[in-house]
Amino acid sequence: MVIVMKPNATKNDIKNIEEILKELGLGVHISTGSERTIIGVIGDKRLIADTPLELMPGVDRLVPIVEPFKLAGRTFKPESTVIRIKDVEIGSKKLVMMAGPCAVESHEQIIQTAKFLKSRGVQFLRGGAYKPRTSPYSFQGLEEEGYRLLAEAAKETGLLVVSEIVSLKSIEQAVKYVDVFQIGARNMQNFQLLREVGRTNIPVVLKRGLASTIEEWLNAAEYIMNEGNYNIILCERGIRTFETYTRNTLDLSAVPIIKEISHLPIIVDPSHGTGKWNLVTPMSRAAIAAGADGLIVEVHPDPKSALSDGPQSLNFDTFNSLIDEVAKVAGVIGREW
Ligand code: PEP
Ligand code: MN
């Protein structure tokens, strides 16, 4: 439920409501809009059954939240969320770029890539240490050593690190090395994992499941937020359809839909979304034009020798042109690159 305050409600009116809710054992989220304040109520609404909040000074009306997701929805929090990680913001006017290889393969590979990406203004280095591969015979990642190599590359370049976690053990290892957790498409409905990352305050890139609806995806975010971690960046990475020319069908309509119904920032992964390196730049342009807050892109110094996802990885030259193209679109729609 949210409490919509009158446009002329005073600071005291708002404080009064906040205190009443807290005394009843409810959580409170205050959104200060340009015209009026909206107070989101977290917890069991039966606790306020005997308190006539609508009669309190400054209150305009009580509005129930009808969506199945509450904390992730715009009814609860009308203003867009901006997530701050050190000196980088996600969800503000300036776009973010997360880039790097699908998997961390070696010291040389990750350092070389990180230095290149830093020189192009990228903020986040991505790289998988645990790789949930379709086949158990494919390269599974360097595990903790992979996280360690990412942290080393980050230290040398000043990049922030985003890397996938797949289990409680990997979370315990990753907290020492990474700035942002990634929850992969295959784990989007691993509810225990969602709860575990919810109990940390580390920002999370939450990828959309391979066959998940937008509502299921926002419910996955809700699991994390319900444990107290509100730092979620949604990531559209393509869904499975009947089309076989591309690896997945990149659902760019998810971007404006999320912007309408949720306050969380959203980025797009055109690499997994298409599976083909030559489609990455056109779909990146489209993603930014659709309103995405940034991109996560696979980049490898030598894609043909990559241990995973080589066919969809850009090399340094093609990544250079991606940056140029995205900057042009950003300028047209009034965003900064
Ligand atoms: C990845 O980012 O390398 C990855 C495995 O992504 P997804 O979970 O979207 O398939
Ligand atoms: Mn990959």
Image (cartoon, rainbow, N blue to C red):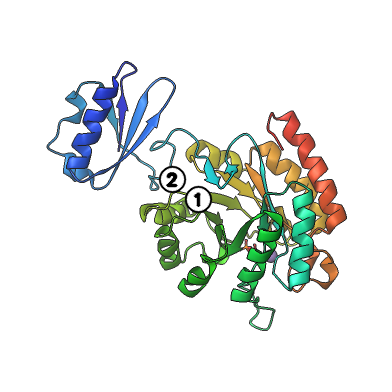
Residue 232 is tagged as: 1
Residue 87, given in percent of the width and then of the height, sits at 59, 44
Q: In the visual, does 210 lie left or right of 333? A: left
Q: Residue furthest right?
A: 317
Based on the displayed image, in which of its 4 quarters is residue 227 positioned? bottom left
Cβ of mark 1 under 8 Å from ligand 1: the answer is: no
Image quadrant, ligand 2:
bottom right
* Amino acid on which disc 1 is placed: Ile
Residue 98, given in percent of the width and then of the height, sits at 67, 53
Q: Which residue lies furthest to the front in this view?
A: 156
Q: In this view, does 74 lie above or below 162?
A: above
Cβ of mark 2 under 8 Å from ligand 1: the answer is: no
At 42% from the left edge and 56% from the top edge, which residue is drawn? Answer: 224
Earlier along the polypeptide chain: callout 1 or callout 2?
A: 2
At 64% from the left edge and 37% from the top edge, which residue is drawn? Answer: 291
Work out which quarter of the rendered image holds the C terminus and state it: top right
Residue of label 2 = 72
Residue 14, given in percent of the width and then of the height, sits at 27, 27
